[in-house]
């Protein structure tokens, strides 16, 4: 499997570790009301689609970038690769 | 020592005579022979026994599809079972032995299985050995295992070297037959980076085995000229003896190159290389495999594929028989007669099913003597060349689940439309079974791929060659009462296929598994289509309706050794050594594996009888004077940035915003689910610069988590991380004399308690200018420091420290003494930080801030985390001070039954304490804090122990912490 790293170009999957659904970026606010329930959902409720799936991959044996890899779990086609930091910022995460 | 069946001609070097042994018998062949061609040249027809019935078997093919001629190659630890004669390049001194017989090959005792055949039909084992149940392990399995199987492993370590490598190209051409050479030439001429891989040692494919002309040259000469041109192109890499065995995602191809398999000795060079090829485009030119026709006793030595007969005659100059008959359902078979006649071999007859000339049986127990025709006539022949048509080698198109489609005009499956990305198919593999078409398709496919990648195709045309249309009329099997073989390697007959259908196993997938058709080491290369055709006929469907099974990697067997490469034994993973490893080894250290690290366990001194002597001495030296321990393996993370404090405050459960410069704080890290993850200390070296330590085990994982938090959770925090675990050598200097020792080591730094108190840190220099960092932290509970120097000074540092400490009795101590000391002090470590314990349970509940949102804090407060019966980390000592303790024991209240309902907790860490003179333990006990002074049972049924223990504070040594602050 080849992942087209936005900064480093095509890289072999062996250089990466995978973490799972990209929704883990969306960490709830721990000081908000109902935080405990929000964290339970955040941690334990995951989609497991046969098809398009956005995942977090970490370039551990490389530049240590976390990436959001959108791929098709049926065909293994990689549709999009983005820096997780850019995705997080686009979702409104900052400090 | 003569070669009675050697003809003239062929692509062999008659000036290079090679001597080899088969079953101990000395024989001769020539450079350019395969073992199979040399055996045939020597008149050897019986070369092995079949898998199930132990029938005599001979060489059937001339390529990788060989189902019969499997041999045990080489001797001793280098022996290789199940090697195909037909692809084994002959070398001087080769030794081979036949397989799967008990007693001599000619008189196999297990041939009795053939007489029992009526009882051994498909599904026999499934149906027969069901009962009595107890017999399976004791009787059936040992007997079946002893009589089944093919070759034997040596049982010794493989002495050969196998390597791994990566290759990249624009266009990968798989197969160097006419289509592949034509494709490689066209692609190479465009300037694209090309790899041409072929499993054979001579490029050319079928051109070397046929008598075709290409571009006015004999086929083999054209192939040689093409190879010569390719060799001049710098952008083309030729990989002969290389099998592309698998297709993987995104243009990744697995290939096995046999580097020294064809030599008598590897001489330290790798035997095989497993290549991972990344190709933007691939052109599959894998050719086609001939298949047989099923008729009675079609498995005798001497019955061969017609294409193989031509290969032996044309390429190797060998007559597979003195009098050859031909049985065919297509025009291709007739070529065989012409080629053999040209070589002066007698032809017994050409029997073409299209003329209703049908072979109905054969005679000859250990080799073919005659054949019987439908008319009843017997024809004397010692070789029968059979052609049932050709099946394209589309295996690689199926590796990503592509489905082949049936083509009636050539009576064969061809690659379907769902090819692996970037792959095209050309030539016979694509169903273009005529020469000119193959040459043209190769060129066209290469030019299209090159153009696609932005290269300019050359206008040069593919060479001219005569095109003979394929004329085939499907004819699969001759009906009869005797057994007719479909899959020679797994001994599957037409009867088995019919039985499978009768018993309801009617889908191709069921047929395969019930009869084991196509499940042998040859993956049914000559058998599958024949089996499907017979199943289709039995079920009254067409072959297209019946469908086909698909293929998985590897295309041909690939040794496990090649996949292991150099990652075996101690090289299975890297070994990490600390900078002062050499010094430790010189000083009597024995080492323990801690992850990939080797850490000194203890340092043995003269007169010590066992490890306990060493550990006790080392622990007492720390308590009494000063000890030095290598703690370089702890994870170290350099954290810098304007928001570094803020970042630390979010990843540690305890507060970090107000840690002053020049101070260290213990940090407790939780997982997001609220359980304890890791712990360590973090030192603030400047307002924007921190150094974190983690446990040795979690160094990589914590770093990964911190990067996740930094990039994904809080992307705009100004903070940067670098793992510096390997950059610093770090030593704990612990004990009442540690300050005295370090005063002589550190330059210009006041180490008095006021100037450098407990939990202080500083950048400094040691021994006259070597940069260092000093931390006043204590794992042992003693007055203690950790001093770090850049790794390159580690060895010098430990030697200098020991020298400076000699007058204070400085003693090196290992991880065992370190563990004893921390248990005495009651610090949690690996036995307690299991990922299943909470901060509360470890007595650290007060550290978890209730005011901030750090990783894990929210869920650490959920009610479930406190409804645990107040499990608490406590200390334990045996009531009988002479008793020893064991980690893993469970606690029981005296008088309670020993069951799960009455479980009170468990022992996590134990040690014999030289300080107290008895065993001590740490453990997690229900309602522990309220039970100090109580006696409970440490119950350990696995070790047969039941020890009364007293509950005490987990801090055996200096519970107030006065000593470490002194």
Image (spheres, coloured by chain):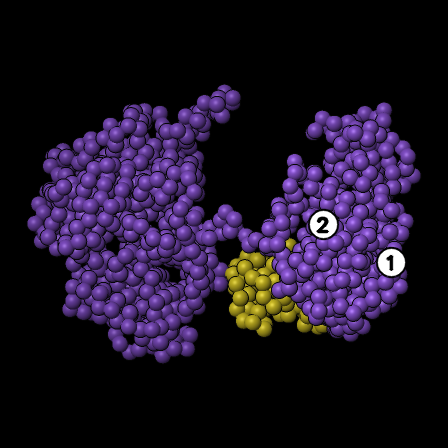
Chain colours: A yellow, B purple
Q: Quadrant of the N terminus of chain B?
A: top left
Of B167 and B160, the residue lying toward us? B160
Say which quadrant the C terminus of chain B sits in. bottom right
Label 2 with label 1: CB-CB less than 8 Å: no
Q: Is residue B294 above or below residue B893?
A: below
Residue in view at x 38 percent, y 77 percent:
B455
Please say whether residue B274 is visible from this viewpoint: yes
Decide if residue B699 is on the left or right side of residue B311: right
- Secondary structure at numbered mark 1: loop
Instruction: Give the residue pinned by disc 2.
Output: B811
Q: Residues within 10 Å of mark 1 (few under 14, many from 20)?
A: some
B191 up-or-down from B246: above or below:
below
From this view, report whether residue B929 is shown above or below residue B410.
above
Q: Earlier in the sequence, mark 2 or mark 1?
A: 2
Which mark, by number, is residue B849?
1
State the residue in front, B789 or B531: B789
């Amino acid at each position: 499997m080849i992942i087209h790293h936005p900064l480093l170009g095509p890289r072999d999957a062996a250089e990466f570790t995978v973490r799972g659904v990209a929704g883990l970026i969306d960490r709830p606010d721990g000081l908000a009301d109902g935080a405990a329930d929000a964290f339970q959902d955040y941690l334990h409720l995951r989609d497991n689609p046969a098809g398009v799936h956005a995942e977090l991959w970490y370039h551990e044996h490389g530049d240590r970038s976390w990436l959001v890899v959108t791929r098709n779990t049926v065909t293994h086609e990689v549709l999009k690769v983005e820096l997780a930091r850019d995705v997080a910022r686009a979702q409104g995460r900052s400090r | 020592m003569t070669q009675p069946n050697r003809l003239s001609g062929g692509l062999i070097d008659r000036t290079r005579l090679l001597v080899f042994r088969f079953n101990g018998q000395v024989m001769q062949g020539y450079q350019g022979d395969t073992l199979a061609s040399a055996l045939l040249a020597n008149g050897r027809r019986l070369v092995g026994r079949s898998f199930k019935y132990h029938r005599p078997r001979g060489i059937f093919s001339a390529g990788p599809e060989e189902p019969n001629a499997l041999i045990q190659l080489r001797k001793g630890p280098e022996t290789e079972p199940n090697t195909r004669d037909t692809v084994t390049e002959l070398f001087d001194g080769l030794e081979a032995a036949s397989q799967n017989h008990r007693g001599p090959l000619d008189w196999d005792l297990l041939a009795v299985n053939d007489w029992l055949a009526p009882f051994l039909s498909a599904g026999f084992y499934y149906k027969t050995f069901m009962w009595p149940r107890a017999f399976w392990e004791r009787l059936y399995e040992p007997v079946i295992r002893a009589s089944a199987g093919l070759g034997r492993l040596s049982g010794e370590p493989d002495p050969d070297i196998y390597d791994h490598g990566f290759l990249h190209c624009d266009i990968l051409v798989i197969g160097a037959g006419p289509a592949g050479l034509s494709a490689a030439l066209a692609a190479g001429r465009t300037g694209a980076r090309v790899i041409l891989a072929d499993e054979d040692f001579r490029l050319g494919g079928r051109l070397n085995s046929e008598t075709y002309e290409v571009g006015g040259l004999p086929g083999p000469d054209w192939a040689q000229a093409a190879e010569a041109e390719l060799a001049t192109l710098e952008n083309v890499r030729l990989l002969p003896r290389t099998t592309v065995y698998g297709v993987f995602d995104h243009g990744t191809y697995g290939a096995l190159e046999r580097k020294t398999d064809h030599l008598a000795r590897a001489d330290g060079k790798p035997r095989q290389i497993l290549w991972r090829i990344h190709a933007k485009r691939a052109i599959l030119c894998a050719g086609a495999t001939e298949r047989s026709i099923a008729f009675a006793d079609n498995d005798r030595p001497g019955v061969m594929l017609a294409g193989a007969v031509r290969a032996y005659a044309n390429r190797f100059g060998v007559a597979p028989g003195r009098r050859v008959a031909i049985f065919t359902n297509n025009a291709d078979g007739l070529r065989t007669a012409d080629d053999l006649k040209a070589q002066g071999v007698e032809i017994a007859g050409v029997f073409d099913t299209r003329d209703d000339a049908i072979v109905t049986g054969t005679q000859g127990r250990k080799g073919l003597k005659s054949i019987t025709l439908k008319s009843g006539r017997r024809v004397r022949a010692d070789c029968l060349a059979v052609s049932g048509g050709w099946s394209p080698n589309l295996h690689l198109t199926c590796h990503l689940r592509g489905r082949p489609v049936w083509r009636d005009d050539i009576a064969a499956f061809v690659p379907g439309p769902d090819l692996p990305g970037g792959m095209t198919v050309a030539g016979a593999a694509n169903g273009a079974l005529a020469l000119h078409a193959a040459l043209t398709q190769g060129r066209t496919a290469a030019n299209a791929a090159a153009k696609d990648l932005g290269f300019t195709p050359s206008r040069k045309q593919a060479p001219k060659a005569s095109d003979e249309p394929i004329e085939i009329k499907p004819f699969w099997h001759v009906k009869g009462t005797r057994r007719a073989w479909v899959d020679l390697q797994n001994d599957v007959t037409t009867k088995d296929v019919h039985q499978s259908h009768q018993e309801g196993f009617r889908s191709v997938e069921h047929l395969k598994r019930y009869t084991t058709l196509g499940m042998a080491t040859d993956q049914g290369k000559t058998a599958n289509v024949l089996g499907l055709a017979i199943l289709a006929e039995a079920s009254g469907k067409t072959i297209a309706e019946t469908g086909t099974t698909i293929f998985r990697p590897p295309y041909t067997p690939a040794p496990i050794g090649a996949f292991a490469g150099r990652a075996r034994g101690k090289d299975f993973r890297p070994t990490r050594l600390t900078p002062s490893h050499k010094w430790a080894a010189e000083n009597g250290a024995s080492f323990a594996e801690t992850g990939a690290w080797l850490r000194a366990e203890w340092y043995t001194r003269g007169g010590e009888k066992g490890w306990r002597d060493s550990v006790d001495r080392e622990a007492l030296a720390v308590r009494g004077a000063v000890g030095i321990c290598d703690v370089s393996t702890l994870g170290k993370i350099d954290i810098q940035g304007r928001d570094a404090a803020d970042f630390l405050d979010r990843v540690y459960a305890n507060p970090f915003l107000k840690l002053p410069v020049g101070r260290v704080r213990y940090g407790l890290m939780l997982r997001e689910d609220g359980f304890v993850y890791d712990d360590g200390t973090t030192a603030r070296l400047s307002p924007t610069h921190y150094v974190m330590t983690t446990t040795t085990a979690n160094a990589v994982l914590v770093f990964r988590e911190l990067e996740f938090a930094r990039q994904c959770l809080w992307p705009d925090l100004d903070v940067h991380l670098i793992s510096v675990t390997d950059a610093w050598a770090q030593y704990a200097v612990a004990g009442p004399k540690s300050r005295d020792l370090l005063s002589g080591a550190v330059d210009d730094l006041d180490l008095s308690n006021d100037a450098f108190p407990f939990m202080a840190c500083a950048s400094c220099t040691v021994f006259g200018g070597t940069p260092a960092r000093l931390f006043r932290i204590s794992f042992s509970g003693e007055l203690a420091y950790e001093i770090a120097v850049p790794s390159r000074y580690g060895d010098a540092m430990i030697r200098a420290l020991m020298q400076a400490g000699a007058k204070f009795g400085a003693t090196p101590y290992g991880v065992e003494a370190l563990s004893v000391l921390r248990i005495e002090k009651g610090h949690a470590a690996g036995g307690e930080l299991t990922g299943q314990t909470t901060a509360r349970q470890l007595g650290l509940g007060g550290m978890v801030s209730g005011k901030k949102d750090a990783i894990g804090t929210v869920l650490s407060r959920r009610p479930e985390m406190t409804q645990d019966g107040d499990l608490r980390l406590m200390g334990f000592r045996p009531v009988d001070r002479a008793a020893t303790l064991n980690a893993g024991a469970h606690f029981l209240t005296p008088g309670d039954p020993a069951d799960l309902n009455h479980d009170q907790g468990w022992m996590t860490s134990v040690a014999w304490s030289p300080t107290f003179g008895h065993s001590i333990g740490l453990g997690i006990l229900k309602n522990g804090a309220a039970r100090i002074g109580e006696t409970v049972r440490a119950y350990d049924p696995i070790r047969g122990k039941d020890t009364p223990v007293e509950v005490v504070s987990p801090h055996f040594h200096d519970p107030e912490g006065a000593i470490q602050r002194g």
